[in-house]
Structure formats: structure tokens, C-alpha cells
Image (spheres, grey):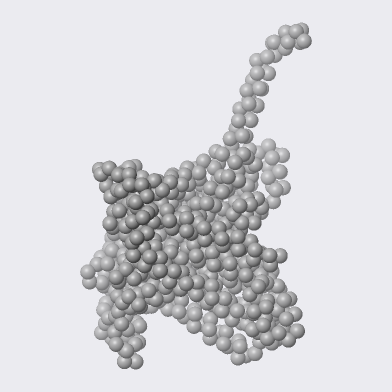
Amino acid sequence: MGLITLDGPATTIDFELPPSPAIAPTHRSVMRKTKSAPPMGFGHSVSKRVKWTGHFTLGLVALFCVFPIAWMFFTSFRPPNDFFTSGLIPKGFSITNYSDAIRGLPIWMLLEHTVIIAVSVSVGSLLIALFAAYSFARFNFKGQNLLFLLFIGSWLVPFQVTMLPNYVMLFHLGLLNSLVGIIVPQLSSAFAVMLLRQHLKAFPTELFEAARLDDLSAWKTLWKVVVPNLGPALAALEILLFVSVWNEYFWPLLVYRTPNSVIQLGIQGFLNSVSVNYGALMAASALATLPILGLYALLQRRLINAFVRSGLK
Amino acid sequence: MFVQLTEQRPVAPSLLGVATLSKQRRFLSFSEPYLYLIPALIGLGLWIYRPLFETFNYSFYNWNLLPTTPKVFVGWSNYTKLFHMPALWQAVGTSEFFLVGLLVFGLILPLLIGTVAQHISPKSSKIYQGLIFLPVLVSPIVTATVWEFILSPVGGFIDTVLKWFGVAQINWLQQMDTAKFAIVTISGWKVLGVSVLVITAGLAAIGVEYFEAASIDGASRFQIFRRITLPLLSPTLMFMFITVVLLSSQIVFPLLNAMTQGGPMGSTTDIYYFLYQYGFQSFNVGLASAAAVCFFFLFGAIALVCIRLLDRFSFYDN
């Protein structure tokens, strides 16, 4: 195990070995086991007091986590500057903040740019990662371990270490202030490669062998055997990548030094303007968050699993 | 032999054809794995490893990022300059502060939450976890915006509530002592969701039998936590520790840029924000690169030590 040994379920993903058994099928089986038995084995001995302390603590933490988001939506529907005059209790309901935000920001253009970037980066890096992971999982070749080490090693290179040279490179390529300049450097995701490789390693080898017996080329095997069977994993990863690109703002900030590029930068420009219109700002923030929360509502479990596997990124 | 050869001559073209075909095939099957890897490798080389070496290179030059000014070779002087800067050591101190703060949110609090969650039904614990996870999805900019509004000294939520209790206006983000805590709390707010999930997953992976056996033997709740939960959970805890150490600056960074710009008086400037300021605001590329090289090796060393430790702790992993 660890960084040096390279075979088996190695390395970065390997850090996750402790938690992953619980995320993967085992988790459900544990849950199922505990459903018939008392929860986590404490059941009989759990007094009402302990139970309510649990609900109280968790409720408090959940409130701390949800409150700012709820407050954002709540404020966005109040009449403008209502919170200055009438405190915490709103005087009425209004969507003026939204029309202010739409007037103050080129919001459709920002959303269009953000969607273009998020879709091309997430689809592009998913494809690139799929090819790379397939290569690692399906073939045995010279330098395999060394190349894989390159992927893991990139995990240790923080963004801030590479940003200056990458900026200079984009300047020389003439890609500053362009969407392409934002998209291209984000296309290679070592994390996606490692996650997909892990999934492919768990792939039943019989399927590969059957494909070989059918004289299916590796390329056709990828599309006719691997992709259809990897659907859920690919979908989860795609969403994860989409969300992280949607929320990314620092790289666009460096490349596109105006607030008129992506939605996150637009909001920041709004935030740093001389007189902050908090109502409109909350409305704009709500608009930028809504698509992500919508995805979460639709695909909660998958998204959570993908996030846990990725660590914190 | 000769006869055979002459006999084969008419057949030779086709044989040759087969030979080249198999050669082509062999070449294809030899190169195929590399072909699949090429796109990813190009990206990795171009945007991770090339700039990494470039950064090493820049750290020995004086340069102001302008393509028209030449780079001047200065040897190790960027490094000596760097180590004599009080601002660097202040930034290191701030990073340590952020790290410790985030370990509370990434390790201690989730451990408490996870242990408490063991005592309520899995179904309601899932609901709480789903809610605690929400901040993870909120972008750093929206996070900064919303919290800045909540902390705003004029009409912000906290200000309004404190006013009820007669507490005077506090400008949370503009005071040296409170700004640091505000940043840690807000980053903690974003981290908590993932760490709670990872740690509850780790707890769920511990067999129920252990807890049952211990409580039958009359172990107290604290004894169970100390003697069973902690040792069996140590690989998960170690994993979270590494993740927080490696990623704490990455989480804090956008918040710093959006909320405090490293201020007031540099009190929230951590090492990466220091690097960013020297690179993109003072345009001292050499110094920023020297700092980047140092931080890269520092975190690399920490990561290696942690992985070693993880190996040792994984003893418990069955």
C-alpha cells in the first residue's frame, strides 16, 4: 500500500481504502444488517435522553450548515434594502432583487459562458480520463507503473505552484481572455483517471475475455462493453466534474481578468463594487447556486458518493 | 534448402504481406495502450509538470512577468531573500492557524457528530448528513458573498441579533483577531459535509459485533469510544488528516481572495496567498516561484510521512 507500491488497488485512491468499503456496497449491507438489528448495535441500551441529545446536536450542526444558504434565498425575495429598515422580519415578498441582478449583470451571457465551460471541461476530461483509465486497466505495457506514478504525483502539485507558468504559457499561446484558455488547462484530471481506473479494475475480467474471443478490437470493447457497463460511475463523475467546474472561479479570474466571463466572477465583481446591493447580490448568488442544488436534489446519493471518493476537491 | 527457397519464391509476396501485416499489428498492439494515454499525458505534461519545472527555473531569476523585460539570473538569492522576509513567517504562522482550525472541522467535529449519529436511527442520520453536505456544493464566491452579508456590521444577521443583547457593532472581517476566526469558520462550514460523510462511512464499516460485544461486557460508552471506535477508525482518521493537511490552503484560498484579500494587516495571508500576492500583484515572479518550490517540497514531505503513517495504521484494516 501507499505511494511506492504500485500494484493492486494502490495509491491516492488507496488513501480512501478505509472509508470506501462503507461507501461501496458494504455500506448498504451494513445498513441493511442494522435495520433488523438495533441501529449500530446500541439500540437496546440507547435511552431516550441519549437519542434526543443526538437529535439536538445533529440538528444544531445541520442548522449551522443550512442557515446561510436558506438566508440567501430568504433575503433574495425580500424587498430591496428591507433588511436595513425592518431587521430580520421581512415586510413583504418581492422579486425586485432578481430583476436588479439581471439588470446589473449580463447574467444570460455569464450563464452561457459558464455552461459552455462546465460542459466542455467535464465532458472533455471525462473522455480523456476514460481513455487513460482504460489503458491502465486493460493493457499491460512497459512503463505502466512509472506513468501511473506521474498521475498520482500530480496530486501533490498544488494549483498555486503551476499558476504563474501556466499564465505565461497562455499569454504566449494568445489564449488569455478567451474561453478556450479557461477550458484547455483544466482538461486533464488525474483524479478522474484514478477513480475510473479503480472502477475498471473491479470490472469482471470475463467480459474482457469474451470480447477478445469475439475478436472485438480494444476500441470496440471500450464502447460496446466497458462504457455501457460503467454508466453509473461515469454519470457520477461527470456530475462531480461539472459541479466543480461550475463553481471554479480562480482560474477564470486569472485568465479572464474582467467580471464579464463566468457567473462566479460576475458575482465577485458585484460584491466588490462600491456600494454593495446585498439584495441583488443574494439574488445573483441564488441563481448561480440553483442549478447545482437542483442536480443535488435529483441525484443526491450518487453525488455524495462521488464527493466522498474525491476527498474534498 | 535451395530447392525449398526457389519453390517458395512464387508465394513470397503473400508471405511478405503477412509478415508486414503482423508487424503492423504487433506495432499497433504495442503502441495501443500508449495511444489511449496520450491525451491525458499531454494535459499532464503541459499543465502540471512543465509548469512545475518552469517554477523551479523561475525561482533562480528576477522577472516581473512582462514578456518584454528579460529574465535576470540571480542564483539562490530569491531563496535567501525569501527566508529573511518576516511576511513569509507570518504567512506560515497563519497557515498553521488555518490548518489547526480546519482539523477541528475536518476531524474532531465530524468524529463527535459521527459518534452521536450512531445513537439515532440510520434514516434520520442520513437526513442530517444530507443537510450538512449542502455547503460543499456552494461555490467559494457564493460562500464569500453570503457570509459577508451575514457578518456585515450594518444590517447583517449576526449584527442584528447581537444588537438585541446590547453588543456593539463588530466588524468581523476588518479586525485582525476576528478575521482569522471568521475565515476558519467559513472554510470549516464548507469542509464539514465531506468529513462527516467520510467519518460516518468509516464508523459504519466497523462491525456492529464489536460494539455489541463490548456493551454486553459492560463497557461504558466512553470506554467503547476510546478502546474500540478510535483504534478501528484510525485509518479513516489518518486519511482525513492527510486530506485536510494537503487541501486546507486550497479551500481557504478563494475565500481569502474574495473576502479579505489577505488583510487586515496581512493577518489572513497564508502561504499560498503570499505566493499569489508576490506573483500577480507585486509581479516578483522569482520570489513567488522560490516560495512555490519551498511549499511544494514541504507539503510533499508531509504527505510522504503521512502515507507512511497511514500504512502503519492500516494494520487494523481487515
- Residue at point 71%, 43% (across, down): A209
Percent across and percent down for residue A119 are 44, 53
Q: In the figure, is residue A231 to the left or right of A107?
A: right
Q: Nearer the viewer, residue B171 or A235?
A: B171
Q: Is residue B49 above or below residue B252?
A: above
The mark total stands at: 0
Query: Could one spot residue A42 in this view of the protein?
Result: yes
- Residue at point 51%, 41% (across, down): B38
Q: Nearer the viewer, residue A181 or B314?
A: B314
Percent across and percent down for residue B9 are 69, 10
Q: Nearer the viewer, residue B162 or A268?
A: B162
Q: In the figure, is residue A67 to the left or right of A277?
A: right
The residue positioned farthest toward the left in the image shown: A274
Q: Is residue A308 above or below residue B121?
A: above
- The quarter in which the N terminus of chain A is drawn is bottom right
- Residue at point 73%, 86% (across, down): B218
Percent across and percent down for residue A121 are 44, 52
Residue A171, quarter of the rendered image? top left
Percent across and percent down for residue B196 are 54, 72
- Residue at point 30%, 79% (across, down): B171
Q: In the figure, is residue A229 to the left or right of A250?
A: right
Query: Could one spot residue A288 in this view of the protein?
Result: no
Residue B240, quarter of the rendered image? bottom right
